[in-house]
Image: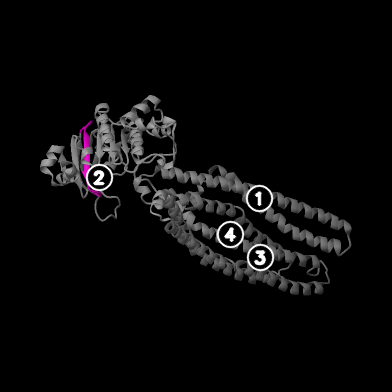
């Protein structure tokens, strides 16, 4: 996992190495300061030698300045490396998500992906900066501090051998108890983001049904859960500081008592035992060593908090798209013919049954095919296999006589233009949205496509016409207008196959008929597949499929189905009963 995430450091590797190196230099200079102070006391103040005070005082200033310089360089390098690493990691995750196919996207909720790209990466960035600074400083300071203290008085260092293990066990124990809570908190963040996203996306429905208080309560419940978990964790972490203070003052008391006896016994003789200056240094080393252990415990807590974001980020990065290009892909789609050869499909290996069962279907290039069926009959699933949004579990799907798995994915999807059931527009002008179909489309081409989709008539009514700004999700246009813009966008690809997945449901019957008539006259060579709920939308099609429980229940022209298919007759009669009367 760490190896995978470390790939995102890339060009920030030098800064990531420089920061801990500077931190080692800072630690080394800091442990020199107590030694110099002891010499000022013993060789300068005690002996009344002003020259020694000045000489060692200058050394003290030099050590402090060097420590400051190393510390500043380490902080700057860590900040540069941390922000760069987070940027690369965020980019890598976002690019990876773009490579996902529909099966991969089904595994992650939208709110979960957003959380991983934002708060999870921010947590990892903070942990990374701590790792290359504090995680180096803490053990280094303890090692250097203990070694310097041992060189002064091995007897007094025994107190460290007693206190350090006890304090370490206590701090690690607290961190161990806190980890499950933080793990739970990050999962709750997904629920919080999901509640916010769902509310904002459906704010009009919330207002229409006067459910504001219900949404507030739902948000408050999730937010309150995070609050309670954080409070519980912080209560446990609150023991860190008292334990640290207890250890520090206990060591100081013991060292003061034992050290004072040693100083008195030696008569402050440098060669006989412990001196006043050395005792002062021991106090400083005690604070440095135990403070480092305290800091290390906080680093450990931070790393513990980061385990969940690391795992979640890793899951996103290592998710492998199930659909990939073959070694030698076909880069040209000959025509718009489509063949389903004994095709079965299920969304997951663990699914209880297939969504499609033994589909045999042959569509000639240029034909218009209508698909009817009750909700849940797998109409959308059938057409999503054509542009290879999913791969067939059994059998094969061919376009232009070639198995879709043998095509270059981009080539295939450029030749198969699909207007999905859920229409999506992006923030920007109408032209910006239309150019998703063809980035190089001219104004004349956009005008022609919009006329075919019956969109030009309402676009001309806008003050800015084709430069009219579309809000995120197309919230400032009606459902029917959104559908027609999406159809126009699909037509700009000049596809060999055009799939409309219930894409005229919000359009009135007159406009629907006009769109179908324009298709028949202007793009006769394009294979057209129309999924609809209204019989009127497909009754002029060359072939009509009636889907039921993932299988083709009936197939034929309108007249043939009226004679042979009870399901089609029921659908037709239920929709035309009122007009007949």
Where is 569 relative to 460, above or below? below
Question: Which residue occupies 81% across, 74% down?
Answer: 264
Q: Which mark is residue 299?
A: 4
Q: Which mark is residue 290?
A: 3
| Rendering coords of residue 566 (x, y %) | 13, 46
Please name which of the two marks, 4 or 2, marks the residue nearer to the observer: 2
Crowd class of label 4 (few under 14; some 14 to 19; many from 20; radius 10 Å): some
Q: Earlier in the sequence, mark 1 or mark 4?
A: 1
- Image marks 1 and 4: residues in contact by CB distance under 8 Å: no
Question: Which residue occupies 43% across, 52% down?
Answer: 199
Instruction: State the count of labels.
Output: 4
Furthest toward the front, the residue is 581
Furthest toward the left, the residue is 563
| Rendering coords of residue 176 (x, y %) | 52, 66
Crowd class of label 3 (few under 14; some 14 to 19; many from 20; radius 10 Å): many
Q: CA distance from mark 1 to mark 4?
A: 19 Å
Q: Which residues are magenta?
A: 364-377
- Secondary element type, mark 2: helix
Please name which of the two marks, 1 or 3, marks the residue nearer to the observer: 3
Please name which of the two marks, 1 or 4, marks the residue nearer to the observer: 4
Q: In the picture provided, is 35 more to the left or to the right than 411?
A: right
Decide which of 397, 122 is in the foreground and name it. Answer: 122
Residue carrying label 1:
22
């Amino acid at each position: 996992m760490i190896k995978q995430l470390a790939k995102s450091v890339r060009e920030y590797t030098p800064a990531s190495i420089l920061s801990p190196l500077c931190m080692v230099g800072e630690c080394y200079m800091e442990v020199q300061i107590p030694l110099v102070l002891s010499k000022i006391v013993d060789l300068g103040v005690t002996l009344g030698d002003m020259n020694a005070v000045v000489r060692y005082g200058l050394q003290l200033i030099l050590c402090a300045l060097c420590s400051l310089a190393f510390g500043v360089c380490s902080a700057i390098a860590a900040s540069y490396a941390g922000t760069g690493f987070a940027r690369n990691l965020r980019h890598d995750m976002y690019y990876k998500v773009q490579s996902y196919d529909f099966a991969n996207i089904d595994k992650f909720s939208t709110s979960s992906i957003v959380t991983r790209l934002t708060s999870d990466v921010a947590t990892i960035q903070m942990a990374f900066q701590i790792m290359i600074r504090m995680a180096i400083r803490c053990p280094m300071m303890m090692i250097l501090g203990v070694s310097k203290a041992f060189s002064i008085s091995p007897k007094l260092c025994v107190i460290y051998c007693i206190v350090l293990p006890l304090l370490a066990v206590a701090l690690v124990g607290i961190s161990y108890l806190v980890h499950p809570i933080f793990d739970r908190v990050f999962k709750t963040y997904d629920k919080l983001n999901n509640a916010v996203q769902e509310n904002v996306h459906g704010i009009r429905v919330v207002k229409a049904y006067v459910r504001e208080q219900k949404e507030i309560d739902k948000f408050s419940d999730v937010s309150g859960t995070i609050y309670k978990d954080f409070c519980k964790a912080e209560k446990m972490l609150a023991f860190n500081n008292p334990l640290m203070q207890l250890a520090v003052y206990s060591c100081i008391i013991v060292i003061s008592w034992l050290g004072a006896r040693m100083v008195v016994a030696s008569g402050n003789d440098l060669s006989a035992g412990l001196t006043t200056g050395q005792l002062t240094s021991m106090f400083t080393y005690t604070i440095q060593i135990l403070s480092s252990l305290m800091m290390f415990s906080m680093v450990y807590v931070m790393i513990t908090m980061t385990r969940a974001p690391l795992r979640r980020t890793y899951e996103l990065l290592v998710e492998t798209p199930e659909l990939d290009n073959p070694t030698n892909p076909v880069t040209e789609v000959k025509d718009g013919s489509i063949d389903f050869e004994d095709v079965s499909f299920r969304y997951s290996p663990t699914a209880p049954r297939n969504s499609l069962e033994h589909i045999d279907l042959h569509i000639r290039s240029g034909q218009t095919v209508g698909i009817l069926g009750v909700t849940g009959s797998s109409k959308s699933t059938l057409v999503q296999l054509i542009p290879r949004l999913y791969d067939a579990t059994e059998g094969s799907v061919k376009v232009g006589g070639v198995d879709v798995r043998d095509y270059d994915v981009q080539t295939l999807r450029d030749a198969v233009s699909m207007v999905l059931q859920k229409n999506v527009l992006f923030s920007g002008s109408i032209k910006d949205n239309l150019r998703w179909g063809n980035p190089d489309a001219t104004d004349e081409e956009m005008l022609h496509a919009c006329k075919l989709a019956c969109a030009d008539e309402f676009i001309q009514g806008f003050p800015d016409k084709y430069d009219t700004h579309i809000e995120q999700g197309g919230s400032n246009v009606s459902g029917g207008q959104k559908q027609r813009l999406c159809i126009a966008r699909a037509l700009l690809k000049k596809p060999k196959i055009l799939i409309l997945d219930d894409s005229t449901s919000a359009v009135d019957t007159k406009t629907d008929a006009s769109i179908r008539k324009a298709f028949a006259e202007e793009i006769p060579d394009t294979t057209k597949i129309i999924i609809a709920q209204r019989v009127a939308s497909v009754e002029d099609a060359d072939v009509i499929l009636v889907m039921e429980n993932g299988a083709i229940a009936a197939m034929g022209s309108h007249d043939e189905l009226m004679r042979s298919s009870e399901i089609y007759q029921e659908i037709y009669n239920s929709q035309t009963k009122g007009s007949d009367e």
